[in-house]
Amino acid sequence: MRTLYLDTEFTSLTLDRSLISLALVACDGAEFYVELLDGWSESSCSDFTRTTVLPQLDLQTYGMTRERASAALREFLSAQGAAEIVGDALRWDWPLLLELLGANGLPDNIVGCRELSADELADDPDVEDAPHHALLDARLICRLASKH
């Protein structure tokens, strides 16, 4: 079974947050990354998001509408074979992934999700300096988890 490592960036650490970017990374190099062009606004972003996350976006290269991003995400997931999705903050990231997929939900080949334990991420200095960029953070999570 394949493992896909998930990370997202969103407007704020509140229940009414909105997705800004989402990444899924596999250890063999397969990647999905999108930055949303709609469904969020800078005015709804926390100060942290405005100063740390937004300056790293490259909407011209990675930007998609929510509708297009949803279709692209479903296409990517469907092509992965039997897979589980793993993350370091699923209580924040998982609902945003499901929301982006919409009413159709996960493709049938996604067999579950799992949150990494603190042990799987501990003792690595890169964790403290994570860039808060969904793709770079998903790559970091993948690298750290594959050490265990």
Image (tube, grey):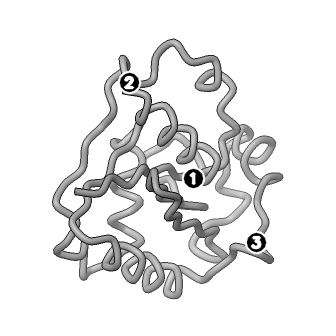
Question: Residue tagged by mark 3?
Answer: 59
Q: Badge 2: how crowded within 10 Å, few (<14), some, or many (20+)?
A: some
Residues packed near mark 1 inside 10 Å, few (<14), some (14 to 19) or many (20 plus): many
Look at 69% across and 26% down and name the residue there: 129
Where, quadrant-wise, is the N terminus in this rendering? bottom left
Choose the circle earlier in sequence order: 1 or 3.
1
Residue 147 in the image: state x and y as whole percent. Answer: 43, 28
- Whole-angstrom CA distance, mark 2 to mark 1, is 24 Å
Tell me the amino acid under the disc marked 1: Phe
Please determine whether, in this image, residue 70 is positioned above or below residue 82.
Answer: below
Check the picture and name the quadrant holding the C terminus: top left
Residue that carries the numbered disc 2 in the rendered image:
120
- Camera-near label (2 vs 1) is 2
Residue 64's spot in the image, x, y percent?
63, 80
3D distance between C-alphas at marks 1 and 3: 15 Å
CB within 8 Å, label 1 to label 3: no
Toward the top, the furthest residue is 123
**Amino acid marked by disc 2:** Glu
Circle 1 is placed at which residue position? 10
- The amino acid on which the numbered mark 3 sits, given as a three-letter code, is Leu
Would you place residue 10 above or below residue 58 in this image? above
Separation of marks 3 and 2 at Cα, in angstroms: 32 Å
In the rendered structure, the answer to whether residue 12 lies left or right of residue 71 reads: right
Name the residue rendered at 79%, 66% in the picture: 58
Q: Where residue 120 sits: x, y (%)? A: 38, 24
